[in-house]
Amino acid sequence: MNLNIALLPGDGIGPEVLDQAVKCLQAVEETFNHNFTYKEASVGAIAIDKTGTPLPKKTLDLCKNADAVLFGAIGDPKYDNNPTVKVRPEQGLLQLRKELGLYTNIRPVKVFSTLIEKSPLKEEIITNTDFTIYRELTGGIYFGEKKVNESGTIASDLCEYSEKEISRIAHMAFKASKNRNNKLTLVDKANVLESSRLWRRVVSKIGESYPEVLLEFLFVDNAAMQIILNPSQFDVILTENMFGDIISDESSVIGGSIGLLPSASIGDERALFEPIHGSYPQATGKNIANPIASILSAAMLLEHFGLFEEAMSVREAVDKSLRKGVVTSDLDETSKYGTDHVGDFIADNI
Amino acid sequence: MNLNIALLPGDGIGPEVLDQAVKCLQAVEETFNHNFTYKEASVGAIAIDKTGTPLPKKTLDLCKNADAVLFGAIGDPKYDNNPTVKVRPEQGLLQLRKELGLYTNIRPVKVFSTLIEKSPLKEEIITNTDFTIYRELTGGIYFGEKKVNESGTIASDLCEYSEKEISRIAHMAFKASKNRNNKLTLVDKANVLESSRLWRRVVSKIGESYPEVLLEFLFVDNAAMQIILNPSQFDVILTENMFGDIISDESSVIGGSIGLLPSASIGDERALFEPIHGSYPQATGKNIANPIASILSAAMLLEHFGLFEEAMSVREAVDKSLRKGVVTSDLDETSKYGTDHVGDFIADNI
Ligand SMILES: CC(C)[C@H](C(=O)O)[C@@H](O)C(=O)O
Ligand SMILES: CC(C)[C@H](C(=O)O)[C@@H](O)C(=O)O
């Protein structure tokens, strides 16, 4: 297969971990006789530094012309606490999601048996945890109208959803449930929010076309508890943008390391793959960042194009690195392996 | 001291647990020679059933004329999944918070040493956890304008904050930090939301008047992770209404049981005390609900009026019930003690 992949390393540890993912894709090309081309462009803080904007037109065009985007990480603390800043790195990612129409963010949450003891949660709580979060990614309070009054004393964000925005991701989530364990949990705050009540109405209606899927509802505050108390109850979780941001990061802790978790952001025409973790500025350039989330994001990319055997070979190589202890120091304090060594090991085992 | 206390049992297990809290207050009256009067009124689903509205005027008036309100629980599942319902029990609680001006919700998160093994989290993670959440309670997306278009296909909720709303709770939170360990963590989503950026600006400014307090910022998605990864890092957490709802419920799991956690909702003139847990409909009328959160809410009420010794005697009686295993079955599966028996035991030990 020929694939044209846009590489967006972004900020912080983004470039280091993305490099390892590319190594693995190259190993896949070789082993399975594919032909991938890679073109790189800047996004985020680094793009602001270079061009004044977090998503240069060149970058956006590259992504629009690619078959898929592989993304590193975004964010730089120098923008976070400075209230006078007008342009923010994160805007680059948000605009990219919007422009590419990536309305569904898919985040698998799984426990690696070799890492069970790394989890802050007790083993009996997390065994058998295996669920996937479908987070709406281009709507809600992230993209609603933002206002500040002239004196800067009142500020607001609008959380708006339309039936159309809800139904397209709901269908994806129901289909995913059908291919898994036939259970879908809608997380919302329908006892308070009008937008949540729309979610409930639309999702309930769509549920009628998926009679084999058990549809449950959970308030987001309760969900935040249930994810820790009993994560194995979940199969597919469907939720809006902001709640998805919070509960998917919370869920990412279950497995013991956020450094392992990939995500896919899918639209009708385009797809982007990125680790869940952020730009981890303290680790930048130290060759200590865990590249596995980025490598598993590449595996999700392969699956997206139907390359299941290829994806499996990447996963198996990752499992081997975990089994053999060829991991970065976040997973094993005594480890002396750097980001690149772990990447090499995994690529070599594909 | 004379105190005029409004009792709002509400729905589900509310009445059962509130009864036990009143028993304890009566024991305090006797032991410490106080004179409390209690007047009851209905709120929530039960008020809808009786009067058509979740917060009857009589109830509101009672609360306005009382020194403090002791609240049970609210919510009935028959209202949750019915999209045609126009009046909801929760509106009663929200309206009450608004009408009484209870803008600060205080939720202490502590680990009872006798219950460490009940937590889903590992002991080494949760020991030394002792923080308090200050959640804004009368603003934000809970109370912003709600809209649905005519065809019912678009719905929105507005999240709006003013400097004034932020600064009054921020002062409370900074003062609380000063009386604790001098650390305040503002939880927001300032990389995306305009309202969060206003929170950061206002809180940073106010922080200059509390130079002894270390002010930190945490994005809400990261906070949802840190609360599980390393809860002992927190001293006081300050956050807006919706984020506070989610992270305080998440935090409530740390200690092993949500049945133990009280909360205080404070305004400039009035105060309301309620357990964090909900109306737990499955347990209603079975005499199995844990009354401790309600009893500890009564202890917070006593503290609010400066009755520290009295509050301490309630806490010590609660500790004794935990130590002696006089607890409901949520804390000890083999326990045969009912809600009322636990309440009697604690009241007898005051
Ligand atoms: C960087 C930030 C804007 C982003 C988000 O909130 O969506 C990130 O936290 C994520 O979850 O991908
Ligand atoms: C019942 C509900 C409206 C309420 C809230 O969301 O504030 C509850 O969850 C709480 O936290 O007190």
Image (cartoon, coloured by chain):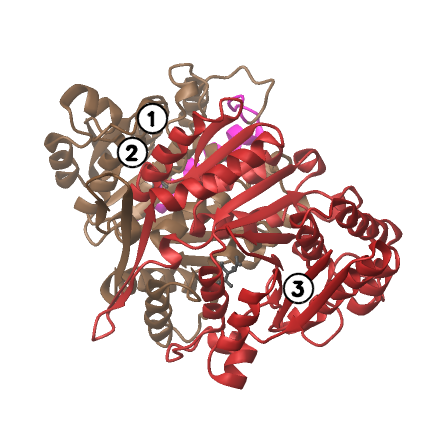
Chain colours: A red, B brown
Q: Residue at x 84, y 60 (%)?
A: A30
Q: Secondary structure at mark 2?
A: strand
Per the image, the residue denoted by label 3 is A4
| Spatial separation of the CA atoms under disc 1 and disc 2 | 8 Å
Please identify, in this view, whether the residue under mark 3 or under mark 2 is nearer the observer. 3
* Magenta-drawn stretch, dominant element (helix, strand or loop): helix
On the picture, is A46 further left or further right than A190? right
Kind of residue indicated by mark 2: Phe
Is-magenta flag for residue B326? yes
| Protein chain holding label 2 | B
Q: Position of residue A165 (x, y in %)?
A: 39, 46
The residue lying at 40 percent from left, 43 percent from top is A166
Q: CA distance from mark 3 to mark 2?
A: 61 Å
- The answer to which image quadrant residue B345 occupies is top left
Q: Which residues are magenta?
A: B305-330
Looking at the rendered structure, whether the residues under marks 3 and 1 are on a common chain is answered as: no
State whether residue A222 appears in this view: no
Q: Residues within 10 Å of mark 3 (few under 14, many from 20)?
A: some
